[in-house]
Amino acid sequence: MADPNNEKDVHQTLFGVSKALIYTCILLAVFIAIMAIGVFKADKITPQKSDSTTTVAVAKEWQAPAPSSIPAGKEGDEIRYGRELISHTAKYLGPKGSVAAISNGMNCQNCHLDGGSRLLANNYSGFIAGYPKLSNRSGHVEPASERVTECFERSLNGKAPAEDSREMKAILAYMTWVGNGVKKGQKPKGTATERLPYLNIAASPAKGKPVYVAKCQVCHGANGEGMLAADNKTYVNPPLWGKNSFNDGAGMHRISNLAGYVKNNMPFGVTYKNPQLTDEEAWNVAAYIESKPRPHKEQADDWANLDKKPIDHPFGPYKDQFSEEQHKYGPFKPILAAQSR
């Protein structure tokens, strides 16, 4: 027969070993868990560092405020009305406008995309912060309201709302909200349009025509007439030339402005992050559009100081001997060289 005392000793020994193994397993499990947490945290830390770098890079570019940040009450109502006027100008102020018939049927955001909030598309980020300022074109210090008036007279080929009107106040309130946080005199990156490098040759309307046919005609029409909306009051896509387009005193009638605009924003859906046109194609299609007829605006009082006149302004007089055609289409490098002597 087995000795009961020996069996008891064996049981106690086995129990002790089992207990030690259990403690060891528990400690091992805790150690593995701690290591796993450490690895998990390490995986989280690395992307955060990378994201931080990306955020800093993006933060260098201006970003429009979210519509949800428009305040409540009368102030917010005025801002929202201003945004509506910028986005759907013709609905209120076009030839069949509900408020007044004082413009050509285009909308402000045809040139100031996304209600003046898109980068490299003539956004309003630094607009209010930049006024009042000396205008080289008019030769005097202008308030922001006068600049808005000029846009109505030139880009919209019409008349502006009165300075004390509800509409002018709303437009300025909206522009102020868009540029909220931009300090006086600051000009955020991507405010206007890209300054494309000058070509070594003149931009060519003939070479621009096939680009227009391939990339622009489907939206803007074979004759640049644009596409009217079903209400026959506004444009789905604006006219690029002809009687209902911007006149020859508008900023878009300077080829460098139009070329930079189309390079980073056209065809529809394109942004500066995914352009479809080469620089040369942008210059040439801009030349094709600028070669077409459009309304004329008297500009005898513009650019009294010829030293301040843009190199690509299409009408004389100039301080140099280069022709209007060369000032309109280039090549611009010889003009620059002559001016720098």
Image: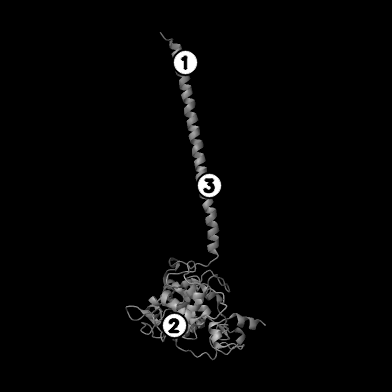
Residue lying at the far left of the rendered structure: 230
Categorize mark 2 by other alpha carbons within 10 Å: few (<14), some (14-19), many (20+): few
Residue 226: give x, y in percent of width and height: 39, 80
Closest to the observer: 245 or 34?
A: 245
Q: Which secondary structure, mark 3? A: helix
Q: If you read the primary sequence from the N terminus, does the residue marked by circle 1 or circle 2 appear first? A: 1
Q: CA distance from mark 1 to mark 2?
A: 103 Å
At mark 2, the secondary structure is loop
The extreme right residue here reads 341
Mark linked to residue 42: 3
Proximity of marks 1 and 2: CB atoms separated by less than 8 Å = no
Label 3 – label 1 distance at C-alpha: 49 Å
Looking at the image, tell me whether mark 3 or mark 1 is earlier in sequence order.
1
Q: Is residue 309 left or right of residue 24?
A: right
Query: Can residue 148 be seen here?
Result: no
In-front residue for pair 201/105: 201
Q: Quadrant of the C terminus?
A: bottom right
Which residue occupies 55% across, 62% down?
57
Residue 316, image x and y in percent? 56, 89
Return the residue at label 2: 165
Q: Is residue 16 visible?
A: yes
The kind of residue tagged 2 is Ser
- Residue 339 falls left or right of residue 73: right
Q: Residue at x 46, y 16 (%)?
A: 10
- Crowding at dot 3, Cα within 10 Å, few <14 / some 14-19 / many 20+, comes out as few
Work out whether residue 259 or residue 208 is closer to the camera in this orientation and state it: 208
